Amino acid sequence: MPMPPGGSAGIGTPDEMRTHLRKFADAGVDQVAFIQQGGRNRHEHICEALDLFAREVMPEFRSTKPGGWRAER
């Protein structure tokens, strides 16, 4: 089975993920959830992926108000 396009299904580079999440933000979605623990993922790899996501992707979508988020351009 071919891999989904980069960024979709929560898989891809930070740039691909930002592009994918931007589509959700533009549609008014303000929350997403990722399942990192599925399959044979090692704990260390899960932690590395979450750290990369937090450093490279989340800042663009961080909210300035409590309990919310916004996509900055």
Image (tube, rainbow, N blue to C red):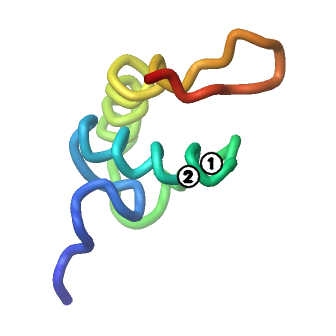
Q: Residue at x 32, y 26 (%)?
A: 52
- Give, as a three-letter code, the residue at label 1: Val
Q: Residue at x 40, y 66 (%)?
A: 39
Label 1: which residue?
Answer: 32
Q: Residue at x 47, y 62 (%)?
A: 38
- Whole-percent x, y for residue 21 in the image: 46, 46
In the image, taking residue 17 as reference, residue 67 lies left or right, namely: right
| Secondary structure beneath label 2 | helix
Q: Are discs 1 and 2 less than 8 Å apart at CB?
A: yes
Disc on res. 58: none
Q: Earlier in the sequence, mark 1 or mark 2?
A: 2
- Whole-percent x, y for residue 56 in the image: 33, 22
- Residue farthest toward the left in the current orientation of the protein: 2
- Give, as a three-letter code, the residue at label 2: Phe
- Residue farthest toward the right in the current orientation of the protein: 67
Q: Quadrant location of the C terminus? A: top left
Disc on res. 24: 2
Q: Quadrant location of the N terminus? A: bottom left
In front here: 69 or 47? 69
